[in-house]
Amino acid sequence: MAQSAFMKKLRDKMGIIFLVTAVLFIAMMVFQWGMDITGRTSPKKSESVVGSTLGEDIDIKEYSDEWKKQEQNFYRNNINVDEFTRAEIREQSWQELINRIILGKEFQLKNTKNVTGIEIYERLSVNPPEWLKNNQQFHTNGKFDYDKYLRVLNDPAFAKEWLPAEQLIASNLPTEKTRTLIETMTYVVLYEVMDQHFFNETEIEGEFLIFGPDCLGSHRVDTSEIALKSYYSKNKNKLPKDPYAIYSYLRIPFHPSKSDTEEALSTTEMLYEKLKNGEDFAYLAEGYSMDKQSAVKGGDIGFIKAEQALPELAAVITKLDSGELSEPILTLNGYHLINLLQDTILEDTTNNSVDTFYHIQHILIRIEPGYETRESLEVYTKNIIDYTRKYGLNAASKQYGLEIHNTGKVGIIEPIPGIGLRTLVNQFAFKEGVGSVPDIVRGNIDYFVIHVDYVTPAKLETFEDYIPVIKNEIIEEAKKSVCRNIAYHAYEMLKTGKSMKEVSVDFGVKYGTIDSVSPSIIFSDTSANPWIIGALAGVSTPDSISAPLEGTDGRFYIVRINNRTMPNYDNFNEISPPLRREIFSARQNTAYDSWFISLRRRIPIYDNRLNFIDIGQAEMEHEPEPGDSAS
C-alpha cells in the first residue's frame, strides 16, 4: 500500500515540486505552449506591442512600468533589490499582466466581476485585510482594536479617506469570489489522511545508484528516413503537440565570503556596544534589523514560547532575566541580538500544564554577499560561460568541477526545473537553437550556466515538422533502453550479494547515501531527489533492494533501504481529525491555483519580449529610478 500510494502522490506532485523552485512571488505559473515565437502565424503587431492574449495587447511601456512599480514597492519598504530578485520581479510582472487579462475575461463569464457597495462594506467590516489591521491608527496598546476600527469605518467624516481601500477591495473581490466558488469543491477522504500520516512520520535511511541519462556509449541508433516514418506512423497520436526545449546546466552557488561574515559580525558587535551604552533598542532595530516585519515594531515579536524560537535562540532566551540583553547569537539566518522585555508563566488548567511565555525584541543582521563577492562571482560565471561556448558544457564541467544537471522537456512558458520560471531563456533557446548558451541566468540565489541541448521546431503539424522531434525521441528511447538494461544487470548483481559501492565501480555509475529522512521532505525541500526518496519509501523491508525505477529526468535509480522507522497508528483516531483539517486547508489554498493553471494551459499567449530585451541585459542592467536610494 505504501509504495503504490507514495508513487501515486509523487507523480501527482512532480509538477508542484518543480514549481516550488520556479517562482518567489506567485505559485500559479506552470503552463504549456501557447504562442508562435517565429511570428509566422501571429497577427502583425504594433512596434510597441510586447505581447498579447485573448485579443488584448500589452505595450512595452505598460510592461516596463509594471516591473518598475514592483521594484519601487521593495524600495519603499527599505528592501534592497538585488539581481536575483530583479529577475523574479520582471518575470512576475509579465505573468501578472497576462493574468489580469485572462482573469478579467473569466470574471465576466462567471458573473463575478461586478462588485456592489454592500459587498465591499461587508468585506471591510467582517474580515478586515491584514494591511488595515497593521495600521497604527486602529491600534490600542500596540494591538489591533476592532471596535476603534469599526468606529472609524462607520464615521461619515472619514468617507473620503476610505475610497482607496474600497477601490482595492473592489479590485480583489472578483478573485476572492471565484476562489470561493472553486474551494467549495474541495474534499478529503480517509485513505489520504492515512497516506499523509505515513509520509509525515516515517523515517528512512539508505543508499542508491543512478544510471544515465546517457548510456549509449558506442551503440548505434537507426534514424534513417524509413525508421523515422515507421516511428511516426506508430506513434503519431503520442507525439508531443507543443514545442519544447531541453537544457543542461551548471549551478554556481551564490554564498557569502569570509569577509561578508566578518562584516555582519562587526555590525552586530557595533550595535551590541551601542545597546550596552544605553541606546534605544527599538530605534536601532528599526534602523538596522533585516527582519523587516519586526523592525517596523522596534524589533518586538511579542510573546512566544521557547520552543517556537530557533534552538540557538531558545537556549539563550530561557537564561535571560527581564530587561537583559543577549550577546550576538549566530543562527542559519544570521546574527541576532535579543532583549527580553518580560517573561510570564501561564497555567492551563484544562490540560494541567504550565507554560512560560517570553516577550522579546530582536535585531537580525543577515550574512549576505557583499559587492566584492558579487563582482567576483559575476566574473567567475562569465568565464565559465565563455569556456562553455568555446569547448562545450562537458568540458566546462570537468574544468571547473561542477556537476551537470539535466532538465527534461521544458515548454516555452514553463519553469526550468531547478532554476525557475525564465520564459525569456526559453524564448532565447527557440531563437538561437541547439548549442547556444545565454548570458548569466539567476534563480534561487544561484548563478546558472545553461546549455541548450535540444529545441523542437516552433510548428508541429506535418511529418516534416516532426522529423527532428522523432529523431530525438528515437535517440532518447535508445538511451533509456540501454540505461534500463544496464540498471537491471546491476540489479541482478546486487541480488547476488554484491555491495552497491562495488557495483557502482563495476558499472561506473554514481553512488550515494541518504541519512534519516522523511518521505514528506520531497514536498517541502526542492533540493531532495524525489525519485530516490520515492524509491526508498516504496521498499518493503530493511536490507531490501528496489528494482530499477525510471525517473522523468531520463535516469534510472536503484536503492537499498538500510533502516526505516514506521509510523505508529495506535493514536490515529486522535490525530486523524486535525490532520484531515490540515490537508483540507492546504487543498483549499491550492484549489484556485490548480484551476488557474488549467485555465492558462488552454489560452494562447503572444510573447514578443525577446525583440525588446537582450537576455543578458534583461537580468543584469537596471537604470535606477528616483527614490532607488536603497540600491
Image (cartoon, rainbow, N blue to C red):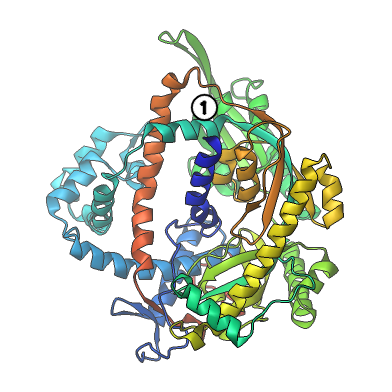
| Residue at 48% over, 85% down | 463
Q: Can residue 328 be seen by looking at this rendering?
A: no
Question: Which image quarter holds the C terminus?
Answer: bottom right
Looking at the rendered structure, the kind of residue marked 1 is: Ile
Q: Quadrant of residue 593?
A: bottom left
Foreground of the two, 361 or 395: 395
Asked if 13 appears above or below 243 in the picture, the reply is: above
Q: Is residue 125 above or below residue 461?
A: above
Relative placement, left or right, of 464 versus 104 is: right
Residue toward you, 297 or 589: 589
Q: Could you tell me residue 363's position as x and y percent?
A: 61, 40
x then y, percent, for residue 327: 71, 32
Q: Residue at x 83, y 56 (%)?
A: 507
Residue 169 lies, in percent from the top left, at 25, 54
Q: Position of residue 422 (x, y in %)?
A: 54, 69
| Crowding near the residue tagged with mark 1, few <14, some 14–19, many ≥20 C-alpha atoms within 10 Å | some
Q: Nearer the viewer, residue 629 or 618?
A: 618
Residue 559 visible at all: yes
Seen at 66% across and 64% down, the residue is 480
Query: Circle 1 is placed at which residue position?
Result: 304
Say how many tags the image has: 1
Q: Dot 1 lies on which element?
A: strand
Does residue 239 appear to the left or right of 474 in the view shown?
Answer: left
Which residue corresponds to the image point at 74% horizontal and 69% vertical from the top-left? Answer: 216
Q: Is residue 224 above or below residue 622?
A: below
> Is residue 26 left or right of 249 when viewed as pictured?
left
